[in-house]
Amino acid sequence: MALAGLTAASCEDFLTLMPLNDIVLENFWTDKNDVEAVLLGSYAALETNDCLVRMSLWGEMRSDNLTESSSNSNNDITQITRDNLLSTNSFSTYKCFYDVINRANTVLHFAPIVAEEDPNYSHRDLLANEAEAIGLRSLSYWYLIRAYKNVPYTAEPSIDDTHNFFIPASSFDSILNVLISDLESVEPNAVNRFGKREQAENTARITRSAINAMLADMYLWKGDYDKCIACCEKVTARKKAEWAELQEEQGTSCNVKDFNGYPLISEVPSGSTAGNAYQEIFGTGNSFETLFELPFDQQVNNSFVSSYYNSNTSSNGNLKATSEVGTNFSSGSNSVFKQKTDGRYYQCCNVNGTQTSNFGITKYVYQTLSYDLSSGSVGSTLKAERFNFNTVYPHWIIYRYTDVLLMQAEALVQKAKANPAQRDALLSEAFNIVDAVNRRANCFNNNSYLTNGTPLKKSDYGTDSQMEELVLDERRRELMFEGKRWFDLVRKSMRDGNSEYLVSKVLKKQDAANQSAVRIKLDDLDALFFPLNKDELKINTMLKQNPVYIEDEFVAKAK
């Protein structure tokens, strides 16, 4: 895609070849094009392999979705999957996100000065650029605090030697409050759409919908459920407006359909095979449902997927799906994808009826995918084509519409717990959302073609806890391998004040000999976060290690 190439090339001479403390207004910051170039450079920094690996692994590797494959030779990955975290682990470093933050801070520092000097740089353009920069900075800190809990926070750029950046960590809650305040302040100024609806910038750059997705996510963690729901509803309103445009342009050939009142890409727009939604979202990219994704092309390629998930051969990458995810699907007794008609199984795992343990990852690996679920036989009619990782690369999705819908469902369930008078209505609305996402995946809007599917029944989820687990289960099915599951489990643990639910899930992938040790470790909520890297502690003596990690050994805190 053009945008990825542009972000890489635009800043080759800036922030790459020239040290930040040598940059002065006279030799670079002269007009709005300079602001745009460095802003695009912030996106380029987020596209680096270091950031991409951490976005996925921090949010996924410790969960019940992933484990190491037989192809893995990286001991750091082995230790993370076994929940043996050390401050020397290479994935515990976070410098790459501070590079994004510093670039965004630099834009925010110089852009107002350029606006005073360049008459062609309008106040509206300035506000829009600032919204993007704050969006990128907030997203970077959002990953950091969910991974580490407490991290150093600064809104100042590193542009000279007068600033002291060896600062102590700020708390999770204090940073979260700042991020929410910042995003709330710029949300009205963010661009709704860059040019035409189909332009790549609409999913590859921070828009108002992307900011609302971030805010909904943050409100959900904070426990501000009304505001979470409001942000989700803003995204839905925007999607419905876009859907109306699509229907006017494409008529009956429009692939976006109505699922319980929500516009989603149909898996089976016509004919008797499914897989269309997967192909549009993960194969082609820049889809109707995508809110923010990182685009890749030959200039900036996505080596993460080929290395960690899979390759353009049939071999696994360093990671694979857990046995819980992969086994017993054809019999209808898989505990994750509970119905044989759930196409998301095909989109996540290698489909081979003879496999019993080595379930390779296929999400982001398959470029095209089609399957007939009516037979109920795994892989019997599956047709898939992998990305050619020498020429074409999958985009990496950070937020998409069904993610936001399921955030709304989770918020509705939590609100129902505190509002007995509204409970039934709120739970019904939450179920309606989950059912919409589930129906799309199981193709229930094409009942003449299915023979084995049964839609969800609200009566099966009568209690608050049952409905809460339904939402979390649906998030797991829908967003598997997208860097979401571990964060979902941590969020529930912080809300519950204990890690019992998380432990019950993740122990399933551990060997019997390791289960007792993992259970003891994860009993402490601080153990749900990564240790600060030993090198970071040496460089910045103001930092304090996560209290459960001392001298690279787990130490239980006194009760």
Image (tube, rainbow, N blue to C red):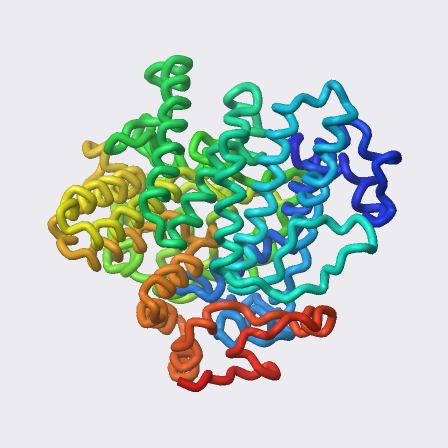
| Vertical relation: 554 (above or below) 335 | below
Q: Is residue 445 visible?
A: yes
254 with respect to 309 (left or right): left
Q: Nearer the viewer, residue 498 or 322?
A: 498
- The image quarter containing residue 441 is top left
Image location (x, y in percent) of residue 176: 49, 54
Residue 336 position within the rendered picture, expressed as x and y whole percent measured from the top left: 30, 57
| The N terminus sits in image quarter | top right
x, y percent for residue 504:
32, 71
Q: Residue at x 53, y 32 (%)?
A: 207
Residue under the image location 53 percent in, 50 percent down: 178
Q: Residue at x 75, y 33 (%)?
A: 113
Give the vertical position of 402 relative to 519 (above or below): above
The C terminus appears in which quarter of the rendering? bottom left
Q: Is residue 484 left or right of residue 77?
A: left
User: Is residue 381 visible in the rendered structure shown here?
Assistant: no
- Quadrant housing residue 455: top left
Q: Is residue 243 above or below residue 110?
A: above
Q: Is residue 254 above or below residue 491?
A: above
Q: Residue furthest left?
A: 459
Q: Nearer the viewer, residue 331 or 540?
A: 540
